[in-house]
């Protein structure tokens, strides 16, 4: 299977599966426990039909949106994800460059593998920094200050990960950083030697946002232990209010589902909330973001920007979220599989295909811009 044969999410996923060792693919693809939420995140879109309007004379389609004061050429962006240079040696460099080519936003994780500063110097398109709240409050302040000095536009606090999810696929293979592979996991690496060759012949793996503060690569700290031991389970609204004030710029809260939490986020000064369940990787059985989108919009949509991620695989999914009232949509696995399969070229192909889908879908909907979409274009079954 070649890059030119990839036309959608499932094709990229299959290409990554063929090229990468099983533990790496399963880390990207896996979710918590029975993975019911992972499946529901996408299935939720199937419960709503699009209601197109014809004879609208749509000549050109404007896909641009504005979120948190940032202007994007596309109504979707590349969400921050961890450990990207494990999947491909270029990691965030490839993702940031692809996002810049298409004029959309990208994010860098606390567990990112390329520094904030390098990416900010290389690209001028909007960049967000995704922060996990650590028990060490001084570390949280230091990381925010570093992001501010680097010129990052938006601070994104993830709040659905105060402890690690029960990701059983990783337990079966022994996936961790550093590797603690089971025999079955080692066999899968042996069957796909090119990944190992690329891993050892390129720049040494590191976590530049954390290496000064946490021993992640020296043999003491696994990803699971990082979430369980390093993050602050008592994180509360007062902590959030302090962070918003200290940051002093655009601030969004990622990982909410409950509408009351969206209202409270607006009250403490957040500019946006991202409806997300971490792609089903945290609490299995939690509500799908698209299922909860209308309820959140109805109580908080006039107070802050409401964004959605988790489960988005198609242009029609994006159009449905926009028609419901979301300001934009975040993509995670949708670009990680292409990254893992073929690096920047594949990420660019994915963005281009998704852009074409959204543009085509909007034209068929009779919508010349995102503003032309509304709930009258949707019908629940």
Image: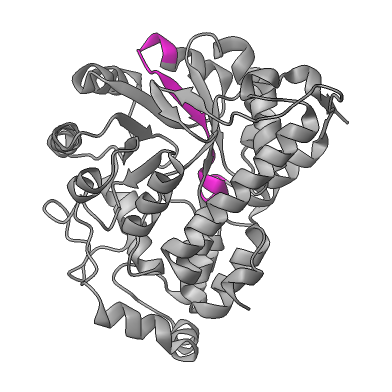
Q: How many marks?
A: 0
Q: Position of residue 161 (x, y in %)?
A: 41, 42
Q: Is residue 220 magenta?
A: no
Please say whether residue 280 is one of the residues in the magenta stretch.
yes
Judge by depth and name the residue closer to the eye, 209 or 88: 88
What's the residue at 37%, 60% (across, down)? 84
Q: Position of residue 89 (x, y in %)?
A: 33, 70
Judge whether 196 appears above or below 279 on screen: below
Q: Is residue 32 visible?
A: no
| 210 vs 283, nearest the viewer | 210
Q: Is residue 171 above or below residue 166?
A: below
- Where is residue 330? Give x, y as percent: 52, 39
The residue under the point 44% across, 91% down is: 190
Query: Closest to the observer: 9 or 99?
Result: 99
Considering the image in quadrants, where does the N terminus appear? bottom right
- Residue 367 horizontal side relative to residue 289, left or right: right
Considering depth in this image, is 287 or 86 the residue closer to the camera?
A: 86
Q: Quadrant of the C terminus?
A: top right
**Image side of residue 14 versus residue 59, left or right:** left
What color scheme is it? one colour
Q: Is residue 153 visible?
A: yes
**Residue 102 x, y percent position in the rendering:** 46, 44
Image-quadrant location for residue 241? top left
Left or right of 205: which side holds 352?
A: right
- Which range is magenta? 266-283
């Amino acid at each position: 299977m070649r890059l030119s044969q990839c036309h959608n999410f499932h094709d990229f996923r299959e290409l990554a599966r063929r090229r990468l060792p099983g533990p790496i693919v399963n880390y990207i693809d896996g979710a918590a426990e029975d993975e019911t939420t992972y499946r529901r995140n996408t299935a939720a879109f199937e419960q709503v039909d699009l209601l197109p309007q014809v004879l609208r004379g749509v000549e050109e389609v404007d896909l641009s949106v504005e979120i948190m004061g940032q202007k994007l050429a596309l109504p979707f962006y590349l969400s921050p994800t961890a450990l990207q240079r494990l999947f491909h040696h270029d990691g965030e460099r490839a993702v940031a460059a692809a996002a810049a080519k298409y004029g959309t936003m990208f994010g860098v994780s606390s567990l990112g593998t390329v520094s904030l500063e390098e990416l900010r110097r290389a690209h001028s398109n909007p960049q967000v920094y995704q922060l996990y709240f650590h028990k060490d409050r001084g570390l949280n302040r230091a990381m925010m200050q570093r992001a501010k000095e680097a010129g990052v536009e938006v601070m994104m606090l993830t709040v659905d990960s105060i402890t690690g999810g029960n990701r059983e696929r990783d337990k079966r293979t022994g996936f961790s950083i550093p590797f603690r592979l089971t025999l079955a996991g080692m066999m899968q690496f042996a069957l796909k030697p090119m990944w190992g060759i690329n891993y050892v012949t390129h720049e040494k793996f590191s976590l530049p946002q954390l290496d000064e503060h946490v021993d992640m690569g020296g043999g003491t700290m696994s990803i699971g232990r990082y979430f369980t031991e390093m993050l602050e389970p008592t994180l509360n609204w007062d902590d959030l209010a302090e962070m918003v004030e200290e940051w002093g710029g655009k601030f969004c809260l990622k990982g909410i589902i409950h509408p009351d939490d969206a209202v409270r986020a607006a009250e403490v000064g957040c500019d946006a909330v991202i409806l997300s369940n971490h792609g089903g990787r945290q609490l299995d059985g939690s509500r799908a973001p698209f299922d909860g989108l209308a309820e959140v919009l109805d109580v908080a949509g006039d107070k802050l920007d409401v964004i959605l991620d988790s489960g988005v695989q198609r242009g029609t999914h994006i159009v449905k979220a926009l028609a419901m009232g979301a300001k934009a949509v975040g993509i995670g696995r949708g670009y990680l599989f292409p990254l893992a399969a073929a690096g920047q070229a594949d990420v660019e192909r994915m963005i281009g295909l998704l852009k074409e889908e959204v543009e085509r879908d909007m034209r068929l909907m009779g919508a010349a811009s995102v503003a032309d979409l509304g709930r009258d274009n949707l019908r629940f079954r």
